[in-house]
Image (tube, rainbow, N blue to C red):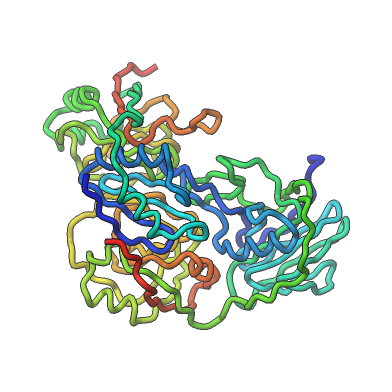
Amino acid sequence: MSMRFLPCGDSAVLVELDDLDAVLSLHAELASEPPPGVVDLVPAARTLLLRVDSRQVDVDAVTRAVAALRPRGERQRDVRTVEIPVIYDGEDLSEVGRLTGLGERGVVAAHTGQTWTVAFTGFAPGFGYLIGEDDRLHVPRRANPRTRVPTGAVGLAGEFSGVYPRESPGGWQLLGRTHRRMWDLQRNPPALLAPGVRVRFVEVPAR
Amino acid sequence: MSPTAVLEVLSAGPLTTIQDLGRPGHAAWGVGASGAADRRSLRLANRLVGNAEHAAALEVVLGGLHLCAHRAVILALTGARCDATVDGRPVGHNSVLSLRRGQVLRLRTPATGLRTYVAVRGGIDVEPVLGSRSTDVLSGLGPAVVAAGSLLPVGAPPPAFPNVDFAPVPDPPHDEVTLQVTLGPRDDWFTPEARDALLRTSWTVTPDSNRVGMRLSGTALARAVCGELPSEGMVRGALQVPPTGLPTLFLSDHPVTGGYPVIAVVVDADVDRAAQLRPGQTLRFRTIHQPRTR
């Protein structure tokens, strides 16, 4: 596993890795045994950001500790598979069918027919950026973002799929909607998705 | 009225929120740390009233807060200095003051600086969310923004008593400020001229600034690498450069991840100073020693 350490102020260091798999492995390792002074870990597509309390430790000391890590494999990784039921009646379904050449039913088949992996989170609490197994559903964002996308909307943008955890503005192409809650503060943990979790979308009829 | 309500907000000014030192540790769920924009001032206010440094207090943007005490309380004001009065009588800044039942604290607009902290002995005791009482204006987590009519509970007084009654802290300046940065993580995505411009030209805070970040105006920074950056983790103090070339300086409620390159990061202590800059004020950046990474 090659790691490149990029400076990120006096309270963080950005570790650049080969791929998402390496990010998720290092994240799992550091999350189970955080080096002293590390207060937050932010996994992303190719990087893992370590935020440190600079009043407790020097960021260089954390860098040295991480550089000296011996990877211990994937046994601690979160490899749950989460099923998300989707009603495929999104406003952009036909447009995505046209853009991909798959047609509406082909888009649904492609979306439900592959396993998605949560690469990283952001945008809103509980929002996961999901990466699929192939590029059939890679579509650009909408040229005109919507000012209001409802909670539970399931969409596509670039190489990602995702589910809006709450109503917000958004530019993703909408395929459908789910009633499964992505974010619920009454639940522990409140987020349904976390980096590394696998997702299968399942088509259900409108009720 | 709830039996625990101690402070009644008569007027909230332009923006008053409840803030503590935030909720780090949940970034993997897409939850940002949030917390006081000027953490040093929050810590000082809490120390003055004998609280733990992380207790929740009020962060008041440009004054305007009027508070009525429903029982006797001990308070401290730090950060941007407002002309403050209790029942019309002037009270000090960076010092301990007390309100008797029924008395009203009023903050006028500060002459310099942007954010005033009002700590109360015992701390503002609203329900924490994921371990913090901070309002995150980007994600909507935490307590509601404080409004006229808000009734704020106050916690039990801590065992410690205040042991200083005045802290000699300089006021936020009204003129140009220099902030220390380290270059990177993505300074190599910019032209040498852009890196030069970042460090040698002056920047102006625009009105398009809030707890998420401060948009700066100045010389547009040109990219040397044209591709798209895969989204990566962001930090408080990051100078993120969108396609306009004009950086945003991220503050406490910044997004957890972002897809535009960060040319440099303001060191932690100086982000507190940045959080006191007003729209129209100018600033410069200078590098400190570069960490031995890379």
Give x and y (percent) for residue B141.
54, 44
Name the residue: 49% across, 31% down. A189
Mark count: 0
Q: Nearer the viewer, residue B186 or B249?
A: B186
Name the residue: 61% across, 53% down. B20
Relative side of A141 to A134, left or right: right
Which residue of the protein is positioned furthest toward the left in this rendering?
A: A101
Give x and y (percent) for residue B289.
37, 73
Relative side of B266 to A20, left or right: right
Q: Nearer the viewer, residue B78 or A76?
A: A76
Give x and y (percent) for residue B192.
22, 75
Relative side of B144 to B178, left or right: right
Residue B148 quadrant: bottom right
Rendered view: A82 above or below B7: above
Residue A182 quadrant: top left
Res B43 visible: yes
Give x and y (percent) for residue B146.
65, 52
